[in-house]
Image: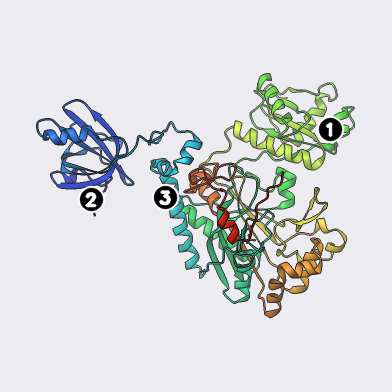
Amino acid sequence: MLRTHTCGELRLDHINQHVTLAGWVQRVRNKGGLIWVDLRDRYGVTQLIFEEGSTDKELLEKASQLGREFVVQASGKVIERTSKNDKIPTGHIEIKAESIEVLNAAKVPPFIIEDETDGGDELRMKYRYLDLRRNVVREKLQLRHRMMQETRRYMDAEQFIEVETPVLIKSTPEGARDFVVPSRVNPGEFYALPQSPQTFKQLLMVSGFDRYFQIVKCFRDEDLRADRQPEFTQIDCEMSFVDQEDILSTFEGLTKHLFKTVKGVELEEVKRMTYADAMKFYGNDKPDLRFDMKFVELNDLAKGKGFGIFDSAELVVGICAKGAAEYTRKQLDALTEWVKRPQIGAKGLVYVKYNSDGSLKSTVDKFYSSEDLSQWAEAFHAAPGDLMLVLSGEENKVRKQLSELRLKMGEELGLRDRNVFKPLWVVDFPLLEWDEETERFHAMHHPFTSPKREDIPLLETKPGAVRANAYDLVINGVEIGGGSIRIHDRPTQQLMFKHLGFTEEEAQKQFGFLMEAFEYGAPPHGGIAFGFDRLCAIFGGSDSIRDYIAFPKNNSGRDVMIDSPSSIADDQLEELSIRVQLKK
Ligand code: ASP
């Protein structure tokens, strides 16, 4: 090694030892006859000192020429510092330098490599390798590393076998567009990159692997957001001879193991809620349970009193924000503007203040007597000091809008503490989802999810009401994972494809291999996949999964560091038998 110790290692115990360190120059302070250099590596920072008189002239000269981020090797004696720094573990010592070697000079970095940096997002993405030198960024990847190790440890102990599945495959429908790769040896044909290893893990169950897992890259060509990347990582799992309960308890186990080993948190029991209840009480299939603020429906109380907007609405529904009656007019106006923004799309906001003197004051006093409003307050279980917020409109829309408002109020009232973790299983998802655009049903999860046996007859009569054996793990309002018990016989799988609008030929062409496998002894099976990047972000207390990915893409799916995607050379296209003609 070019060093005897790391830059994070030396303490008072090492006094008088001769050591050699190697690392990056974090900072140089030059006081004329005295030069301090902070040397940094992954493990920490150690101070080197060069002093006129005791250090020879040439050495002092060398030190004075060091620039930020130079890579150097320095040798010297460990001495006790006269003015100690308690903020860093090496702060009680310094190295009295005896020699220094520049291993590689460096250009001035485009932003400051400190915890607080002056670099904007794009710049740091372009020089991601420099950004990764910053402690705060590297620590996120170290957290990810820990989580990976602990995942493997738990899965291995539970008898899961890690199997790699191919990346060049054909389409797996997970509800997004595929990324495709042209095949040179099969001109005009394309592979698809897996949206998930779904069909392969099911085939592994047919092969008798019984318990499979993989920490695997998945690719989905979707519109990007803070919590989405075109390529992301899943903890992907499948089990045979299980029912839903087995899967929930195994993965509750994994979640608890991770919280305990990585964060030192004893996770509470994971609650259960049906999809129907989640929508009814939170307007959302991934409710944030760090705070209550359940929806209260007011149709019975609010309609028929002459207020046209409520009378004509399909649903009048509200939430009670505890202790928020003191919101000022200005704050309430701001909330009203907020719900009226196109992103939320509400027509307006009705509020009722339950003042601390017990009086009720609303924006609709013209239509509702104080007795009426007392009845509302009762329905909301409101107490003096509370603020009731009510929206109305078409049922599905108004639930979504109120769900957003609930999260906003949770945020404003400080109820979404990043150090509190409220896990939830949402169960009994609908099997199918109506798509307005294409005017047909889509699989809500994916086409391999099994319907609840008792609901199968409804497939013919009321497909939208069929429930699936599907579940999601939600933590703090973030969908961390999802899975299902699968269909494992050909006739049911065929029936499912039929209801999804596939012709028999199409189904056979795309998924004949899977249906055929089901005819060779497929065990009952089911599984789940966790979004690993999101799980890391939750653990790290961040909203963005990007921070937990070493080399992420930006909002337009671009890697600005390597400048990809990019066009390719004509001879490469020629080899692929491809001619590019972009549509105007
Ligand atoms: N393949 C599914 C997904 O990526 C997970 C599963 O059903 O196991 O969401």
Residue 122 — which label? none
Kind of residue at disc 1? Ala
Look at the picture and state if 452 lies above or below 544. Answer: below
Q: Taking 5 as reference, is 368 above or below it?
A: above
Disc nearest the viewer among 2 and 3 = 2
- Which residue is at a point 75% across and 28% down the rendered structure image? 349
Q: Residue at x 69, y 71 (%)?
A: 514
Q: CA distance from mark 1 to mark 2?
A: 76 Å
* Earlier-in-chain disc, 1 versus 2: 2
Q: Residues within 10 Å of mark 1 (few under 14, many from 20)?
A: many
Asked if ligand 1 lies within 8 A of label 2, the reply is no
Residue holding disc 3: 142
Assign ligand 1 to one image quadrant: bottom right
The answer to whether residue 135 is seen in the rendering is: yes
Q: Is residue 535 above or below residue 163?
A: above
Hey, what amino acid is under mark 3?
A: Gln
In this rendering, the label closer to the viewer, 1 or 2 = 2
Residue 531: tell me if it is visible.
no
Q: Quadrant of the N terminus?
A: bottom left
Q: Is residue 355 above or below residue 559?
A: above
Identify the residue position indicated by label 2 in the image.
3
User: Is the C terminus in the top left, top right, bottom left or bottom right quadrant?
Assistant: top right
